[in-house]
Each structure stands twice: as structure tokens, then as C-alpha cells.
Amino acid sequence: MVLVRKLRDRLATQARALPVARHAWARYRRRRYEERIERFLSERTGRADRLPIGAVYEATMRCNLHCEFCYVGDLLNIEGEWQQELDLDALSRAFPTHDGFQVSLTGGEIFMRKDIMSVLDLFREKGYACGYLTTNGTIITDDRAEALADLAALGFLKHISVSIDGPKELHDEARGLKGTFERTCAGLRRLQDAARKKQAPLRVSINTTVAHESLDALDQMVDVAQELGVDAIGLNHLMYSTPEEVAETVRLIGAPDASVVATFVTADPGIDVRKVREKVAALQQKCKDRNILFDFRPKVHPPLMDNYYTPGTKLEGRCLYPFLHARVSFSGKVYFCPFIRVEVGDLSKNSLEEVWNGERYVEMRRRLLENGIFPVCRRCCKVELSPEPVAVAADDQSRARRAIPLTVVR
């Protein structure tokens, strides 16, 4: 069975490298997705299926870096609280045994958790598939690289996303520690070498973010990818909300204050939308020229770019993420979504199945359907933006843009 799965995954990976196959696969996934969410949209009760199709598990909030742009930065290394990480027994009780369940891991830096490989083994034994895990790559040792390659060879681990912000000097500055780029590259190479030796079908990509400080060097990410032997780049558009959008969201969800919203909050991110359009297009073309896979989120296509980067401008769309995926914190608390951290359950007290259609979860989903998206959802990586931009008043379009440092504010 393992050999069959391994062969199937390798053939699927090779097939998806072909443009025609990628487009066909994307159309198939879109059709399946629309079929899955049709009931939620028609019934509008806020109830989901018995279980989510997957969960994102924030394995730890500890991190070995202090990146100034990290939107969860003020959740990291909270004194004493990291000790509340669910242990293996609690994780085993909380998560169902369910073949094909998709789990992905993020943090913090997941490899700051000493038992992280045991956590991954536990999920594998439950019949799960690990869709992706994110890491800064700096503490991937030889032993960890070997263990991760083994999990990929077994068909459990599918994809590792390594965060890189630009060429060496820029990356080190953004990460707040000199030498970070070299450590990240070393970890990534250990991982690639181990996967090659074991012939493991493990996809490794680098992930970068649109930011004021890195915009000029954005297309240089292709050079970084080629230097590292990586054939895929993921781009995050800057995710942010204005204070007004936060306040309106707090009102709509009935939260006591703005502390439940976890994103970059600013009246103006200070990014020149014309330069964003130019640099993203250059990155995309360079990827195409050098046969490097390119994807971006949210799906800010050129017609939407002005509205996206103009603070306060309305964007239409929808989000069905909370109907399909659970967001589980290191301590077992289940949150509505990555940005709206309203607690909807606690896996240290109840199982995921019990929490998934609990009263608070259902109520929040129903409010989401009533509003299409909440204001802070407009610039989230999970949102499905409508392709047609909302009209912007002339005085808003002509407003001067300021270049200000990117600093995370909760």
C-alpha cells in the first residue's frame, strides 16, 4: 500500500508540473469545492458537516526569530503560556481517527517544539495526510531532515513551505538576526538532500510577502529559488485591516473588544500600488521564463489591485474556510479563523467532533454568511474575492500615498 501511494504521489507531482495538467487539476478542484459548499450556502444555518475536511494546528507559539512583520508576533513566546501545548495523549484524544483527514502545521516555529516529530507521527498513525507545514528553516537538522523525508516517502507529508523574504541582506534585516539567510538555506538543502536520497515525493517551496521594505527586490526571489534548487514560489499579498474595519468587525461579531482580531492594523500601509503591480508582474513573468511555479494569495488579480491596496476601500467576496477547516491553537483552543480569534471550543475539554458544530461555531458561521465577509476578511489569505472591483470615488483614487515602515500592530 505504501509503495502504491508513493508511486501515485510521484506521478501526480510530475503530472502537475505540466501546464495543461495543472489547469485541468485546478478546474477539477474548483468543481469539487463548489459541490462541497453548495449546501452551506443554500441552507444558511451555519452548520457544517460532521467533521471538517482538515485542520491547521498551531503546534507552538514559540519562535527563535523576532520578525517585525509577523502578524502573530505578539502571540509568540508569551511567558509561561507555551507550556500549555497539548501533550501527545491530549492530542490523541482530541483529534479523530479518520483516514484522509488533512492536517497542516504552523506556528510560531514548529521545530521549537521538541516533540514535533512525535506529533507528526501521531497524526500519521491516525490516517491523516499532512498538506503542508511552514517553517523558517533555520533549525532543520540532519536528523529532522531525514525524519521528514521518511514521512514524505510514506505518503504522509506532502509539502514544506520555507519563508524567505528576499536576498541575503534583506532577509536577515527582516528577520532581525544576521546569518538567518544562510541558516535557512542550509536547512532547506538538508531537507532536499534527504528527500532525494529516499526518493520521497516532497514538494518544497519558498514563500515571500509583499512589503514596503522588500518590494524593489521582489523579482529577485526567482534568483534565490534557482540558487536553492526550488521550483515553486508562493507570494502573499500584504494582509492588513484599517482601524475602522476592525471596529466594524468587532460590532458585527459581538466581540467585547478588538483583541480578537489578529492581523496587521494600519490606517495606511504606505505601499505604492503602481509599484506593486509592476513588481508582481515582473516576478510572475520571471517565474514563467525560468519554469518556476508561481502562485499568490489572496487572489488579487490586476483589476482588484487598486482597491486592495487603497485603505478603507470595500472589496466584495466570500469565505467558506470556517465551514471546511478548523484552526486549533497550541493549547487546544479552537478559533473561528486565523484573523478572527474568537474562541469557539477547547480540545482540552471536548473532541474536535463535539466542537465543530458547537453553538458558538454555528453562530459565527451564520453571521459570516449574512455578511458575505467581515470587513477584516477583505485582505485575508483565505478570502475568495469577487473578480469585479467595487467603484472607488475619485477623491479616494487621487489620495496621496505615504511610504511608512511596516510595523505589526495588534
Image (tube, grey):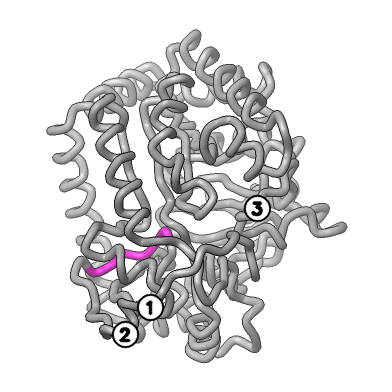
The amino acid beneath tag 2 is Asp
Q: CA distance from mark 3 to mark 2?
A: 56 Å
Q: Which mark is residue 399?
A: 1
The correct choice, above or below, for 274 with respect to 130 in the image is below
Q: Is residue 368 visible?
A: yes
* Magenta residues, start to end: 381-386
Residue at 42% x, 33% y is: 220
Residue at 29% x, 76% y is: 316
Q: Which mark is residue 93?
A: 3
Q: Position of residue 275 (x, y in %)?
A: 36, 54
Residue at 49% x, 16% y is: 195
Pointer 2 residue: 395
The amino acid beneath tag 1 is Arg
- At label 2, counting other C-alpha atoms closer than 10 Å, the crowd grade (few under 14, some 14-19, many 20 or more) is few
The correct choice, above or below, for 26 with respect to 2 in the image is below
Q: Position of residue 110 (x, y in %)?
A: 66, 41
Which residue, as the protein is rendered here, is positioned at the far top? Answer: 197
